[in-house]
Image: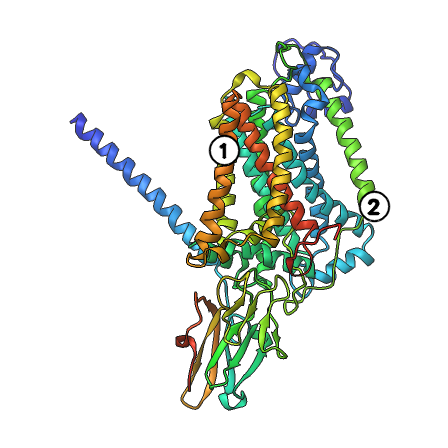
Amino acid sequence: MSENKLLRKDFMNIVWGAAGLLAITELSLVGLSFLSPRTAEGEFGGVFKLGHYDQYPAGSVTLVEAGRFYLVRLPEGGLLAVYRRCTHLGCAVPYDLSVGKFVCPCHGSEFTMDGDVLNEPASRPLDLFTLSVNEVGEIEVDTSSPVERDQASPNHIVYI
Amino acid sequence: MTDHPTHPPEKPALLTRIQQSIQRGPIRPPDDRSRMKMVMNSLILHIHPSKVSKPALKFTYTFGLGGLLILLGSILAVTGILLLFVYTPSPDAAYDSMIALQTEINFGNLIRNLHHWSGNLMVVVGVLHLLRVFYTAGFTRPREFNWVMGITLLLLIIAANFTGYLLPWDQLAYWAVTVGTSLFDYIPIIGEPLTRLLLGGPEVGTATLTNFYGLHIAVIPLAIFAIVSFHIWRVRKDTITVPREINQERDKGKVTTLPHLVSIEFVFALVWLALLITWAAFVNAPLEEAANPAHSPNPAKAAWYFMGFQELLLHFHPVFGAIIIPGLGLMVLILVPYLDQDMETTGIWFRSVLGRILAGLSFFLGVAGTFGFVWLNEYYLDFPGWLPFLPSSISNGWVPLAVILLILIGYYELLKAFGIKTCEARQAIFTLLLASFATLTFVGIFLRGEGMALILPWS
């Protein structure tokens, strides 16, 4: 009889403890998702519609200021959306037209047109945004999350 | 009415009764006993014990650093609350608030300067407070956990500074925070989501300002207040360590807190307040042009207290510069009181004459060695170039880290071989690392020019 009571007490302790943990976990998740970033279309973090790919000649680099990325049309015609943020310490990397590469003003990292590292201290290529071309040839770039890559690869390039 | 016989009680005057309803005892207690009682019964004075060690009142023991931190925290709270009434936390309006502080608002500049300089000074004084406790072995049993709380507080002070750094929304703020948060990005696995949560997106923007504002005005101050209360309560319970000279017995003498400690604190606070206001009246907090996310300055530097880490990152693979080395450092710092339990030297500066010499020597070696390493690394050392067949995490991470650890272990063993006591040898290693980090910070702040190239003052 008394043993049963003890078991019941232990059991209830565990149940209440677990309920407490569950409450803390749930409330933490609510808090975290409350704090998670929001995004809107046409703002940085949202989706950008950039019109027909014909507007961008081969071998051109066009800055999309609001989206903080460069629309790169490689000489052979492939498309890339290259994030402007330097992978070293986050500076805004301008494209130097005269030498045809990205040169970071902060700490001297250099990148090729497709974002690959030419010069340290940056340790990986510039990040990309997901770029897609629909049936009528219009370009869409989703800036919600940058795609990190360890090496530049032709797989990242979108061909039409 | 009751039927007890009533003697007309001596009724004090109304004003006296009001005063006694607030402060129960006499305002100026006449003797030690009532002074002690006043401390015990007062909410504010009760952060002190009723009696304190007489030798510990000596200024050159504590230098009043903990008290100064409380003063700076209070100044920050008051000026911070004033600034709240002027500041708008949005990218469009924040910089305008700064301009308004400079041009329209009465004493706007003075209040902002006081807030800015007190905040920065707090980092310096926090570190000095830590060093004072370290070099007098003030962390010995039962004070170990208070040391850990102290380190937590120092980290929170830095967090408060860093979140406040963004709020003016000028070029300095924008890029220092961009570079500073990019340092966290290098933490494996959790770095990227953590940075994203902190920034409210992939880079510094509207959401970042809102996040930093909330952290700066509510979360961090509340956390500091809570932990500081615990920290001071522990000091009161464990009592302060008693200073003494080498080969001297502990002086067990005690005096009442009121007036001996309280009067020192009052004068000290007043002098510092005067110094800070004078400084703030003449030296303006920096303000550059409004933040421009499209244009990075050259060079882009993190806030000054992060420059040691940014400098590390120039020399090591990111995972080592941003995580492994600072992480090891922090871990060792937290473990200090748990490793060192030499109670015999508590209260003696640098533990002994030999300890003083060794600390001085180690400091010199740390400065010279680090500066030499930075210089060699700029012009001659090239581990990744010499070991091209290895990934850079090994050639620029494990290899230099191993070299440095070997040097440290060698130094420690050398000291032990000369019969140096363990606690003094550990103190020497700590001093070497401290000097090294201080040198890195100095180089980062003062000797790095365009493209983070090393600029030597004589070249």
Q: Position of residue A59 (x, y in %)?
A: 53, 84
Q: In the depicted view, which residue is nearer to us: B78 or B144?
A: B144
**Image height check: is A62 above or below B97?**
below
The span from disc 1 to disc 2 (Cα, nearest Å) is 51 Å
For disc 1, the marked residue is B410
The subunit letter for the residue under badge 1 reads B
The C terminus of chain A lies in quadrant: bottom left
Residue at x-position 70% and y-position 28%: B64
Residue at x-position 50% and y-position 58%: B385
Q: Position of residue B374 (x, y in %)?
A: 61, 48
Residue type indicated by callout 1:
Gly
Say whether mark 2 and mark 1 are on the same chain. yes
For disc 2, the marked residue is B281
Viewer-nearest of labels 1 and 2? Answer: 1
Q: In the depicted view, which residue is nearer to us: B324 or A84?
A: B324
**Image height check: is B450 above or below A9?**
below
Residue type indicated by callout 2:
Ala
The subunit letter for the residue under badge 2 reads B
**Image height check: is B65 above or below B215?**
above
The N terminus of chain A lies in quadrant: top left
Q: Position of residue B381 (x, y in %)?
A: 56, 52
Secondary structure, mark 1, is helix
User: Residue A124, can we see it?
Assistant: yes
